[in-house]
Amino acid sequence: MAEELVYVQRDELRQLFLTQLVNSGLPKHFAEKTADLMIFADERGIHSHGAVRAEYYSNRIKAKGYNLNPELKFEQTGPCSGIYHGDNAVGHYVAYKAMEEAIAMAKDKGVAVVGVKEIGHSGAIGYFAEQAALEGMVALTVCQSDPMVVPFGGTKPYFGTNPIAFATPKQDGKPIIFDMATTVQAWGKILDARSKGKDIPETWAVDNQGEPTTNPHDVAALLPVAGPKGYGLMMMIDILSGSLLGLPFGQHVTSMYKDLSEYRKLGQLHIVINPAFFGDRERFLAQVSQMVDELHAIPPAKGFEQVYYPGEIQETVIEKYKESGIPVAKEIYDYLTQ
């Protein structure tokens, strides 16, 4: 039977996140940014990275699995490159600060490539891509995660869900944000299905025998999106955000769940481009906007209302949830309000 849902308004839910994080021992400035990313996800319907993560973050904070008093520093390594040293702090805050450095560098130099070194889980990475787009930049950000995906043709996990996010500004000031895991679905979608008592499609994951399963509680590993293509993407992302920064890679990345007291030492890479260095900025914005208009004008296929640009449906979810509230499993809501 499906789990009962509670519908919560955005600001109330964000405050519940913040209170829970602070009460668990996370310093306020870290907790504020973590709550921002959690609500960013939930209000867009990306429930894999919102309320469903609250208890996990709380337990990891209590277990000292984050460095709560880190020495954060930015090291510029070249004219357009740098490393932001996260000292195993909460990833949401560190990745945000690293993107600030990347944006400033790209505004000055045209391009910035900034590695984010040794962090915890950083949430929905589309947030960081949007951060750059709101400053008029084009951004690509990638992040590694721990092994929970079987490689194409295999039966045991090697890579993580290894997400990739892209964002660009357009004329109306509302960025296009495209954020995806390189698996058919993120691990958080499995957690969300478990919390709501729902089955999953058999194309999402496999059990301990490497066989497809529809029971989220039987999931042992996820499947790469589009078979060998997703497999190739997750390898590329692992190299860019792990090996490139001298960090653990593939099956050597620290588990998210096994030992909550162990630092994760994850890597992320921000690539930021200033469109003004590559052509006329206004023409660029006009072309992006024209592309959106032309996509909208394409007649929809049977069963579809219209053609959306990638990530656009999440914007419609934001508007929907403003009226209905954000759905949260009652068990999770009870945990947040206890």
Image (tube, rainbow, N blue to C red):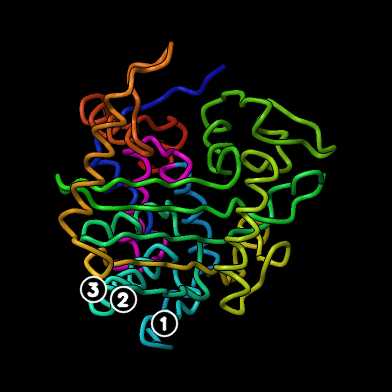
- At a point 44% along the width and 81% down the height, the residue shown is 83
Q: Spatial distance from mark 2 to mark 3, Cα to Cα?
A: 10 Å
Q: Is residue 107 magenta?
A: no
Classify the position of the N terminus by image quarter. Answer: top right
| Residue density around tag 1, few if under 14, some if 14–19, many if 20 or more, within 10 Å | many
Q: Nearer the viewer, residue 21 or 33?
A: 33
Instruction: Name the residue beneath numbered marker 1.
Output: 82
Q: Secondary structure at mark 2?
A: helix
Mark 2 / mark 3, whichever is N-terminal? 2
Going by the image, does 251 lie left or right of 262?
right
Instruction: Tell me, yes or no, whether the two marked residues, 1 and 2, touch with CB atoms within 8 Å.
Output: yes
Taking the view exactly as shown, the residue that stands out farthest to the top is 302
- At a point 71% along the width and 43% down the height, the residue shown is 221
Tell me which amino acid carries mark 2: Glu
Instruction: Name the residue beneath numbered marker 2.
Output: 101
Q: What is the quadrant of residue 189 in the picture?
A: top right
Classify the position of the C terminus by image quarter. Answer: top left
Tell me which amino acid carries mark 1: Gly
**What are the residue bounds of the magenta stretch?**
24-51
Mark 1 / mark 3, whichever is N-terminal? 1
